[in-house]
Image (cartoon, rainbow, N blue to C red):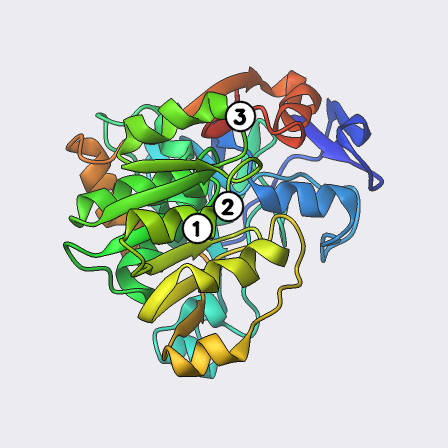
Amino acid sequence: MKAAFFKEHGGAEKILYDDYRDPVPAPDEAVVRVRACALNHVDLLLLDGRFPPPEGLPHVNGCEVTGTVEAWGAGVKGLAKGQRVIVFPGLACGSCEYCLRGERTVCVRYGYIGAHKDGGYAELVKAPAQNILPLPEAIAFEAGAALPMAMLTSWHALVAKAELKPGQTVLVQAAGSGVGSAAIQIACLTGARVIATVGSDDKIEFAKALGAERVVNYRTQDFVEETKQWTNKRGVDVVVEHIGGETFERSTYALTRLGTLVSIGSHDTHWGRLDLRHVYSKNLRILGTNLGTILELQTILDYVAAGRLKPVIDRAFPLKDARAAVQHVLDRKNKGKVLLVS
């Protein structure tokens, strides 16, 4: 098969488009012919070596995949060749303490297709059969590929972790990202009000169109002061934070008493400071989360099929142009998800 992969760490120039070994399914696995694969921040961490692929190099990135069933192992039932599917990217052992408690995202051997295993920057990808869900006819392959990490992570952060309620206020960082654009929609779906940050003025109307009442350019405005002004000095109930560094620290200042900060990534740096006086005096909750459950992904599919949530897609590149797609994201030109299609 053809794939976009890398043999050494670096920037977009390290991605090669060439022949690659075909995936062979184990008895409990299936092979999917990839129709669309979304780029994700974890792809960049793998590429530049901040998160080296556990199985070594060469490696194929791509965690968010839709396509059609191509083949399956001897122990798999219920799939049909050509069936439209979406791949749940989380990998868990199913037998450790945390899996048995129903918390598979903190499995001691947790991983992702596209990170811990070869992923969807390819014509074919394999996955455990239990990770494969039918993709409704109402959802295009491209739209479906924007769901398994960005939309799902935002859903789990706001609904399961922060327990967002109607009438509450939410600060969403980086509205132009896949996570940010999803979080705005999900917050509005629950009946919450949203203030969002963007890194350039050309993304302001984009964020407002998704449902944000106030949009702040964090490069030219103080988002903490703007948030306090928007909430009449009260602060917001919830912050969705996935930048890290100074943004993480200052996000706590934007919270009201009993507020919740949900950390779902660290695009800038893995480090972040906390002024603990704010944490204990305001009784703040600082929560971490990654991805979500396969049942939550099914719920999201239902909402998307019904038109109540809409994946935000910036643009799609042919698989052979994976290098250009990655550079587009590295240059922060995207408003929503960037896809590879074949």
Label 1 – label 2 distance at C-alpha: 5 Å
Q: Nearer the viewer, residue 11 or 90?
A: 11
Q: Which residue is mark 1?
A: 225
Q: Which residue is mark 3?
A: 334
Q: Looking at the picture, how far across and down is residue 338, in whole percent?
A: 52, 27
Q: Say if 286 sits above or below 321 in the image.
A: below
Residue 222: which numbered mark, if any? 2
Q: In what element is the residue under mark 2?
A: loop
The answer to whether marks 1 and 2 mark residues whose Cβ atoms lie closer than 8 Å is yes
Residue 238 in the figure: left or right of residue 38: left
Q: Amino acid at mark 1?
A: Glu
Mark 1, residues whose alpha carbon is within 10 Å: few (<14), some, or many (≥20)?
some
Label 2 – label 3 distance at C-alpha: 23 Å
Q: Amino acid at mark 2?
A: Asp
Q: In what element is the residue under mark 1?
A: helix
Q: Looking at the picture, how far across and down is residue 192, in whole percent?
A: 20, 50
Q: Nearer the viewer, mark 3 or mark 1?
A: 1
Q: Residue at x 19, y 39 (%)?
A: 303
Picture quarter with the N terminus = top right
Q: Earlier in the sequence, mark 3 or mark 1?
A: 1
